[in-house]
Amino acid sequence: MMREARDAMALSLHAAIETLIGAPNDDAYNNVSTKLITFEYAVGNQECLEDAKKAMTSIAARHDRVGRIGVNALEATALRQASCVMDRMLARIPVKKLLKAELKTQIFVERAGL
């Protein structure tokens, strides 16, 4: 992957996570969710994704209970750690594979009505 494309994708990932942590809302949650789905399509199930998915599941469960999106300190740490690992992995993902993963995610989101 070209350095510029990798840098843009990494920045987008980090920004999405920091937005969810700093200004939690439904759109921020959905943005991070779709990035995690895309990443999983691109690289398969990785341990860093499992920790991030657990954090996202916890955030969603809390939303279901209280009706608001919120991120606690443990969830924030898990998401930040996962983003750092994914950041390093991005350089090894071929652009075509990532574009294909983004298309799969788009189809998944459309079919799920999200």
Image (cartoon, rainbow, N blue to C red):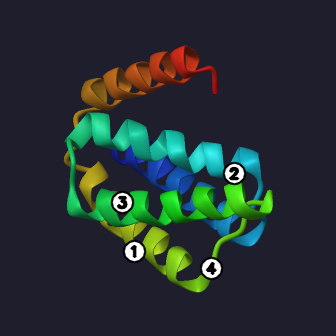
Disc 4 versus disc 1: nearer the observer: 4
Residue located 22% across and 34% down the image? 94
Q: Please state which amino acid type lies under the numbered disc 4.
A: Asn
Q: Does residue 43 sit above or below 82 in this rendering?
A: above
Q: Earlier in the sequence, mark 3 or mark 1?
A: 1
Please give left or right for residue 16 compared with residue 2 in the image. Answer: right
Where residue 66 appears, x then y in whole percent? 78, 64
Which residue has dot 1 on it? 81
Disc 2 versus disc 3: nearer the observer: 2
Quote the CA–CA distance across marks 3 and 4: 22 Å
**Number of residues whose C-alpha sits closer than 10 Å to that of mark 4, classed few (under 14), some (14–19) or many (20 or more):** few
Q: Please state which amino acid type lies under the numbered disc 3.
A: Asp
Which residue has dot 2 on it? 28
SS label for mark 3: helix
Which residue has dot 4 on it? 72
Q: Earlier in the sequence, mark 3 or mark 4?
A: 4
Locate the N terminus and report the quarter of the image it occupies. top left
SS label for mark 1: helix
Locate the C terminus and report the quarter of the image it occupies. top right
Disc 3 versus disc 4: nearer the observer: 4
Where residue 40 appears, x then y in whole percent? 30, 42
Q: Please state which amino acid type lies under the numbered disc 1.
A: Gln
Q: Does residue 14 sit above or below 104 in this rendering?
A: below
Residue 1 in view of the camera: no
Q: Earlier in the sequence, mark 4 or mark 1?
A: 4
Q: Quadrant of residue 68?
A: bottom right
Residue furthest to the bottom in view is: 73
Q: Quadrant of residue 87?
A: bottom left
Which residue has dot 3 on it? 87
**Residues at discs 1 and 2 in contact (Cβ within 8 Å):** no
SS label for mark 2: helix
Quote the CA–CA distance across marks 1 and 2: 18 Å
